[in-house]
Amino acid sequence: MNLNAFVFQAINGLSAASGLFLVAVGLSLIFGVTRIVNIAHGSLYMLGTYIAYSLATKIGGALGFWGGIVLTAILVGILGAIIEVLLLRRIYRAPELFQLLATFALVLVFNDAALWLWGPEDLLGPRAPGLKGSIEILGRRLPTYDIFLIVVGPVVLLLLHMALSKTRFGRLMRAATQDREMVGALGVNQAMLFTGVFALGAMLAGLGGALQIAREPATLTTDMNVIGDAFVVVVVGGMGSITGAYVAAVLIAEVKALCIALGIVDFGLFTVNFSKMTLVAEFLVMAIVLIARPYGLLGREQGVVRSVAEPEEPMRPATTAVKIGGLIALVVLICMPLIAKSSPYTLVLGIDVLIAVLFATSLHFIMGPGGMHSFGHAAYFGLGAYGAALLVKWFAAPMGLALLSAPLVALVGALLFGWFAVRLSGVYLAMLTLAFAQIVWAAVFQWETLTGGSNGVLGVWPSAPFESRPMFYYLTLALAVIGVFLIRRFLFSPFGYAMRAGRDSPLRAEAIGLDVKRIHWLAFAIAGCICGVAGGLFAFAKGSISPETIAVSRSIDGLVMVLLGGLQTLTGPIVGASVFAVLQDSVMRSTEYWRALLGGVILLLVLAFPAGIVGGLSKLFTRRRSAP
C-alpha cells in the first residue's frame, strides 16, 4: 500500500481512540478511588448504545440524536449511582476481587435486560444530523462525524484535567486515589465521594457508547468486547493516569488501524495476514508494555502486593468433621452411576461438575495461597484440551497418551507465561495473564490448518474401556480426586508455606532466603499442569473442542467459581465450582433469560455470603461456637 493510504488509515484510527478512551477513563477513575474491578463497566457502555439508539429513532432529528447523546450519558450516570448505592456500598468491606463477582452478576442481568427490551438483532442508529458529509484527505473520503470524534477525546481529556485540578471534588478524587483511608480520617463523606465517582465513570461509559451509534450497531456482545479493550487501555496507560489512558487508547487504536491497512503482506518465504491481527493486537501491545514497564506507560511504580484480602487465619489440616464429610461425599460420587440409572443426564452433569472442580481448584491454588490474580487461566485449560485433541486428530494417538500430553502442553505454557507474570502484581499481573490467554485464543482461532479455526477439532471420543459414560465418569472422578489431593499436599508442604510467605510479605520472605519469584513461578506451573488435565478431560467429554474453550468468558467463570465458594478456604473452590456448574445448567434449561436469573442468584449469594459460601458458613459456625 502507498504512504497516503497508510497515513489516512492512521487518521481514521484516531476516531476509534476517542470511544475507547471514554470508556477506559471512566473505568480508571472508578478503580482508582473505589478499588472496584468493575466488569459491568462494559455493560454501561452497551446500554449507552441502546438508549441513544432509541432516543435518536423515537424522537428523531437533531434533538433526538444530539440531545439523546447528552440524555443517555445522564441516564447511565444515574444508573451507575443507583448500582453503587444499592449494591456496591453493601460490600465495600468484602475482598476486592469478591466485588468483581457482584459486577459480573450485573453483566448477566444487564445483558438479558437489553435482550428483553431491544431484542437479539443488531441496531444501527441514524447518521449524525449536521455531520452527514465527508471531506477528502489524501485522496480518500473521511466522514465528518469521524473528525468530530477525533476532537471529542482531547476535549474530554482537557475537561477532566481541569475538573481534577480546579474543583474540590476533583482534589478529593486525587486524594482518594493516593490514600482513601486518610481521606476518610479527615472527615470526608466517603460514601458520597464513591457514589459521585461511580456516577461520573458510568456517565463517561454511557457517553462513549452513545457516540458510537452512527458508526457501529448496538449489539448484545458489546459489553464483554469493550470491557476487555478498556482494561487493556487502563493498564497500558497506567492505573490512575488519565493522560496515560488517552495515550494508550490512541496507541491501541492506531495499531489496530495499521494492521487493517497492511492487510496481507508477502515476505517471500511466508505470508502474514495482518488484518487478522486486530483480534489480538491490543493484548500483544499490553504484554510488551507490561514486560518492559510493569506499571504502564505513565503509571507510577508500585510495591509488590500479594495479599488478596483481610488477614486470614493460618491454613490448618482438615478437621475430623471435614474429613468425614469429604468421605461421605466421595462415597456418594462413587455410587452416582448406580443412583442415576434412571437419569443418564445426571452423569453428564456430574462429569461437568468434576471438570469444573479441577479447573477451579487449580486457579484457587495461585489466587488464594499464592495471592496472584489470574484473569487468563482458561489458557492452560485450552492448551490441555487442544494438546489432547490434536494428538488424536493428527496422529491417531490413543486416549491414554492424549490425556498424558494435556498437562504437559499446559505445563509448557504455564512455565512460559508464568515467568513473565510473576514479576508483576495486582491488576497488572491479572491483565498480563489475560493478554497471554487472548494470544493463545487468537493463535487457535486463526491457525486453521492445524486447529480447524472457528470449527475446532471434531470427533475426539473416549476409547475402550472408557467409551461408556459410567466408565468415563469414574475416570474423571479419579483424576479430579488425585488433582485436588495433590494440590492439598502442595499447600501443606514446605513449598506451600513458602508460597504463602511470599504472598503475605515478599520482602521478609526474601530476607530469610526464599526466592519468591521462583516459588510463585513454580506455583504457576503446578496450577497450569493440573488445569491442563481438566482441559484434556473436557475434550473427550464433549467429543470436540473449539476456540470458545479459551475465551475470556471461561476465565471469568473460573473466577466466579473460586470467589463464590470463598477465596480464603481450601474447600471453597470445590463448593463454588459445584454450585456454579449446577446453577448454570439448571437455569439455562429453565428460561430464555437464564443469564439474568443466574446473575440474580449470584447477587443474592454475594449479599448473603460476602466472604463466599464456605467462608460465610465458617464464620457463622465460629460465632455460634464462641457465643455464650
Image (cartoon, rainbow, N blue to C red):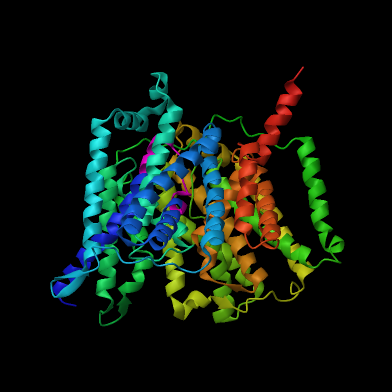
Q: Is residue 331 visible?
A: yes
Please name whichever residue, 92 or 300, is drawn nearer the observer in this view of the structure: 92
Q: Vertical placement of 506 versus 587: above or below?
A: above
Q: Is residue 188 magenta?
A: no
Whether residue 489 is visible: no
- Where residue 532 sits, quadrant-wise, is bottom right
Q: Nearer the viewer, residue 512 or 460?
A: 460
Q: Position of residue 125 (x, y in %)?
A: 38, 65
Residue at x 56%, y 76% (from the top left corner) = 457
Q: Residue at x 49, y 59 (%)?
A: 552
| Quarter of image, res 607 | top right
Give me the residue at 49% from left, 62% from top: 220
What residue appears at the point 45 percent right and 78 percent down from the top-left corner?
448
Q: Nearer the viewer, residue 176 or 495?
A: 176
Q: Is residue 591 left or right of residue 449?
A: right
Please indicate whether residue 310 sits to the left or right of residue 325 in the image: left
Eyeballing the image, is 271 above or below 466?
Answer: below
Picture quarter containing residue 534? bottom right
Question: Going by the picture, which residue comes out furthest to the bottom?
Answer: 268
**What is the x, y in percent for residue 94?**
55, 34
* Main SS category, magenta section: helix
Q: Which residues are magenta?
A: 27-43
Q: Is residue 307 left or right of residue 33?
A: right
